[in-house]
Image (tube, grey):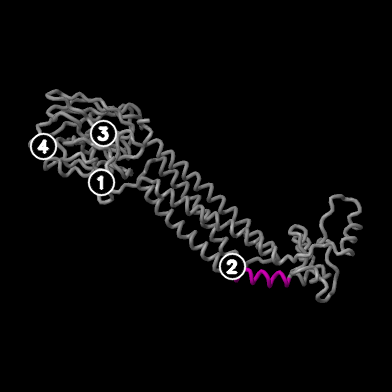
Amino acid sequence: MEGCGMSCIKYLLVVFNALFLIFGVVIIAAACVDMGLIKGFAGMETTGHETDAVLIAVGVLIILVAAFGCFGAWKESTKLLYIFAGCLIIIILLELSVGIAAAALRPQIEGTMKTQLRASFIKNKSTKEEDSTYREFWDKIQNNLECCGVTGPDNYGASEPRLNPSFSCCPPDDSDRAVEIKRSDCLSLEKYYKEGCEDKVLSTVHSAGMTVIVCGILFCFLEALGQTTYPLNDNRAEKQIDLSMAPHHAPGLQAVVHFIADEESGVSGDLIFTQIVPNGPVTIEGNVTGLAPGLHGLHVHQTGDIKDNCKDIGPHFFAYYGRHGGPRDPIRHVGDLGNIKAEEEATLNLKIVDHLISLAGPRSVVGRSIAISKSEDDYGRASTEDSALTGTSGPAVACGIIGYLH
């Protein structure tokens, strides 16, 4: 479990972005279905399409951003993840705008649909060949929605030409035999559907629209949840170092550090860092003398400036991890290497294996400083701000700059 921290969060980000991509596809599909329903009902080619068009654009943007986020998480790129977080905020604002617009335009859309439904019903009663599409449309919705006329079957005889309700107002027969006889019997005995189609059409379109809006709200929730899982650092005041001295990772990299003590401690020592395979664990071996008996925090710091008794080495090296922790914690600063224990009047021989630091790439410790603290690291367990940042381990008693051995 010691090496789970980086790997678990990395793959969690990839999986989370894969879910984003799927939701983008769902939003596009829901918007297309809603657009098809609106277009199909009474030839309403334009009514209500604006909201769906925006949702389709949002869905496409979600897919692109999700793919971008997957790439950034896989490559462990802090800059890409920051850009991704900014894109998520834009998407959330767009989705909220679409939801508000859909709610605001609903009365206008319903009014237009009612007008066009009634106009199309009049053409449905026409015997002209050019109006056959309207007859087919009304037969279709009366069959599928189990309704008759606009507000009821009386609409067929309420205006010229006065007609009996269409066969499509009759419940379908389970048998293919004598269909015409049974349909005629239906009309003569007035067994046709009594409910009008206007309310059912509006209800169907409203349900489809609600599906689209719910998808958008659900995705907003997941995006907000995703934002909280990204361990973007809280130490934004410190600029992250881009180490151009390690552009690639060759097998078998080694680095070394020589500790320089402050004016009072007299601590000295040397450590060697070895990384056999790219992205593999780093082994730290060496010895330290002059430490006071007890536990002392060991941390890689953000900068390599060791002048003035290690006072300018900056915060713990965080990359994109924001909270201090122990070496086995799933979320920690990259530079949190835990405690080392010194015995009385003895040389401390160290061997530490860490799965989060690296000798190349965005988690490289080369060019940064490593420091031994005066006190024990509490791994961020105390409920204080200092514990969350440094583990309350006190000032450095010795520090050194990590450099490549070869």
**Of callouts 1 and 4, the N-terminal one:** 4
Give SS at disc 3: strand
For this view, does 307 lie left or right of residue 220? left
Q: For the residues carrying marks 3 and 1, which lies nearer the camera in this image?
A: 1
- In the rendered structure, does residue 138 fall within the stretch colored magenta? no
User: Residue placed at 12% from the left, 34% from the top?
Assistant: 261
**Of callouts 3 and 4, the N-terminal one:** 4
Distance between the alpha carbons at the discs numbered 3 and 4: 21 Å
Crowding near pointer 2: few (<14 within 10 Å), some, many (20+)? some
The one of 293 and 223 positioned closer to us in this rendering: 293
Instruction: Point out which mark residue 262 bears.
Output: 4
Crowding near pointer 1: few (<14 within 10 Å), some, many (20+)? few
Spot occupied by residue 294 in the image (x, y as percentages of width and height): 18, 30
Residue at the outermost front position: 383
* Viewport quadrant of the C terminus: top left
Query: Which amino acid type corresponds to the residue marked 3 in the rendered image?
Result: Gly
**Of callouts 2 and 3, the N-terminal one:** 2
Q: Quadrant of residue 403?
A: top left
Distance between the alpha carbons at the discs numbered 2 and 3: 59 Å
Query: Which amino acid type corresponds to the residue marked 2 in the rendered image?
Result: Arg
| Magenta segment | 105-119
Q: Is residue 130 visible?
A: no
Instruction: Point out which mark residue 106 bears.
Output: 2
Residue at the outermost left position: 263
